[in-house]
């Protein structure tokens, strides 16, 4: 009751100043909590944007690498020079490693994202089949000079797989 008695004995001017000061204190607290919430939301939004941007960039890189891999494979099938064929095989192998890395990164980064994971798993399965057929049948046939056979594989089932991955 001491504080109430002290407040009661003050002049109107002092009472108004005290009430005004307490009100300012509460308003400052509300503003501080609001600013903290806004900063936190902004940071969360920025983090989400960066994650989405990174994922989108990885998916675009994946598509570019898949297109390059297919392009180099088709170029290889019209090549007659053994040294150029071997160079194309090395290019394809390097791109394959990059594609494997990107696919691994996308699946590791989106382990809980139900919308993305089925597509990544589907692309992984198609990519593994694509790679297996390319490495086991198409490249050996091209290296042996059987371009017609290799081209029939590349424009048959491989083309369907490639279209499905895109």
Image (cartoon, rainbow, N blue to C red):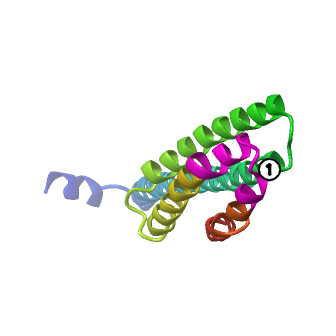
Residue found 45% across the figure and 62% down from its top? 121
Say whether residue 46 is visible. no
Q: Position of residue 161 (x, y in %)?
A: 61, 67
Residue found 71% across the figure and 55% down from its top? 150
Q: Position of residue 56 (x, y in %)?
A: 64, 56
The residue nearer to you, when weighing 17 against 104, is: 104
Tag 1 secondary structure: helix
| Image: magenta residue range | 134-151
Judge from the rendering whether residue 44 lies leftward or rightward of residue 68; answer left or right: left
The residue nearer to you, when weighing 27 against 54, is: 54
Q: Quadrant of the C terminus?
A: bottom right
Q: Is residue 140 above or below residue 64?
A: above
The residue nearer to you, when weighing 67 against 31, is: 67
Q: Position of residue 126 (x, y in %)?
A: 53, 62
Chief secondary structure of the magenta span?
A: helix
The extreme top residue here reads: 83
Q: Which residue is mark 1?
A: 77
Residue found 13% across the figure and 57% down from its top? 1
Magenta-drawn stretch contains 154: no
The residue nearer to you, when weighing 43 against 34, is: 43
Magenta-drawn stretch contains 150: yes
Judge from the rendering whether residue 69 lies leftward or rightward of residue 100; answer left or right: right
């Amino acid at each position: 009751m001491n504080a109430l008695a002290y407040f009661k004995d003050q002049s109107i001017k002092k009472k108004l100043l005290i009430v005004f000061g307490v009100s300012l204190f509460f308003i400052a607290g509300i503003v501080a909590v609001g600013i903290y919430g806004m900063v936190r939301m902004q940071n969360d939004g920025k983090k989400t944007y960066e994650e989405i941007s990174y994922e989108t960039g990885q998916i675009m890189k994946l598509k570019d690498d898949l297109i390059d891999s297919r392009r180099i494979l088709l170029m290889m099938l019209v090549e007659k020079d053994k040294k150029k064929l071997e160079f194309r095989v090395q290019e394809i192998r390097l791109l394959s490693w990059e594609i494997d890395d990107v696919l691994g990164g996308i699946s590791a980064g989106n382990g809980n994202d139900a919308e993305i994971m089925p597509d990544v798993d589907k692309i992984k399965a198609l990519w593994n089949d694509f790679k297996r057929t390319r490495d086991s049948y198409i490249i050996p046939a091209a290296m042996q000079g059987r371009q017609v056979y290799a081209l029939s594989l590349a424009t048959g089932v491989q083309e369907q797989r490639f279209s499905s991955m895109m």
